[in-house]
Amino acid sequence: MLADLEFWIATLSAGIAAAAFMTFIVALLSMVSDRGRDGMDPPPAIFAPFMPIIRVFTFYVTSNFSDERLMALEEKLQARGVSFMVTAEEFFAGQISLAFVFVAAGALATASGGGVNPSLLLILALLGGILPELWTKDFKRRRDEELVRTLPIYLEYLTMCVDAGLNFAGAISQAVEKGPRGAMRNEFRIILRDISSGYTRADALTRFEDRVALSDISTFVKAIIQSDKLGSSMKETLSAQAKQRLTERFQRAEKAAMEAPVKLVIPLVVFIFPLTFIMLLFPIVMKFVDPS
């Protein structure tokens, strides 16, 4: 009888604790909103599964970081092209959330094996904090390739819009509205935002050049600024830039095609040739080993 009573008391206590914990979690989430993401792209895949946790850390922790620290991170996120997907507060919160999730998963996995290894948990926490940084670097590399690839397409859009009678800002607006989604579209949106904020066209383009730091973009920006200073035809400048970018893209493709045979030499020598020799020499060796 006493044992049954103790069992029911323990069960009731566990239920009350679980209900209190769930109520606490619901209360935390109810105070957090995602209104700060209005007008932003969906969160990146590395953060998407953990967005409820990230919002909690953003609301209660990282939003209280110093403005200097947040502004420095925001500039870095803009330079890497992810500022339309994640804010500085969310990025810090994402690092904390991933570290927390990795540590929790590691603790649960090792608890049943006889004990928790503090060194392993520390490594998992560092890994969770570093992964978002590695993701942004890889995203920047892929983004730079996309910018170089899509620049001629957007230059064609701008040329057609200017030829139709629009000014440069109106042409960029039409390119953003009609152009393909991607990194270049986001960068043009930033240019429009800078112009609307009071920057001159030259200053907005210079900020674009500094933010991206690519030679093709620098050439395009310098050509537009020079065209403004000299009063030359914007249509001819954009058309010349589009043709030049297309020519450079074909030259890069030809160069990559010419380099492919050279890059295949090492895999051929290390992997394919030895296997070929083994297959050819194996019957001969076996005849010498077993003459019968």
Image: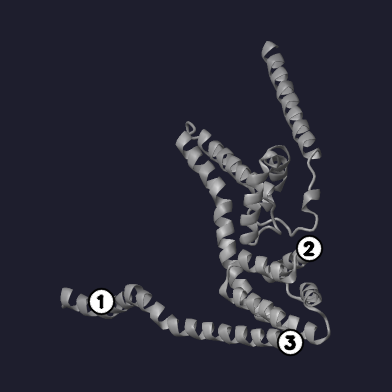
- Residue 188 position, x and y percent, is 72, 70
x and y percentages locating residue 46 in the rendered image: 63, 54
Q: Which residue is mark 2?
A: 198
| Label 2 to label 1: alpha-carbon separation | 76 Å
Query: Which tag is nearer the camera, tag 3 or tag 1?
Result: 3
How far is disc 2 from disc 3 in space, using C-alphas?
A: 24 Å
Residue 8, above or below 199: above
Q: CA distance from mark 3 to mark 1?
A: 72 Å
Residue shown at 72% from the left, 44% from the top: 55
**Amino acid at pointer 1:** Phe
- Give the labeled residue for mark 1: 282
Coloring scheme used: one colour
The C terminus lies in which quarter of the figure? Answer: bottom left
Image quadrant containing the N terminus: top right
Residue indicated by mark 3 = 233
Closer to the chain start, of discs 2 and 1, is 2
Farthest residue, direction right? 165
Could you tell me if residue 50 is visible in this image? Answer: no
Q: Secondary structure at mark 3?
A: loop
Residue at position x 66%, y 87% from top? 240
Instruction: Tell me which numbered mark, 3 or 1, is placed earlier along the sequence.
Output: 3
Q: Is residue 172 left or right of residue 145?
A: right
- Crowding at mark 1 (Cα within 10 Å: few <14, some 14-19, many 20+): few
Name above or below for residue 106 compared with residue 159.
above
Residue 148, given in percent of the width and then of the height, sits at 60, 75
Residue 288 in sight: yes
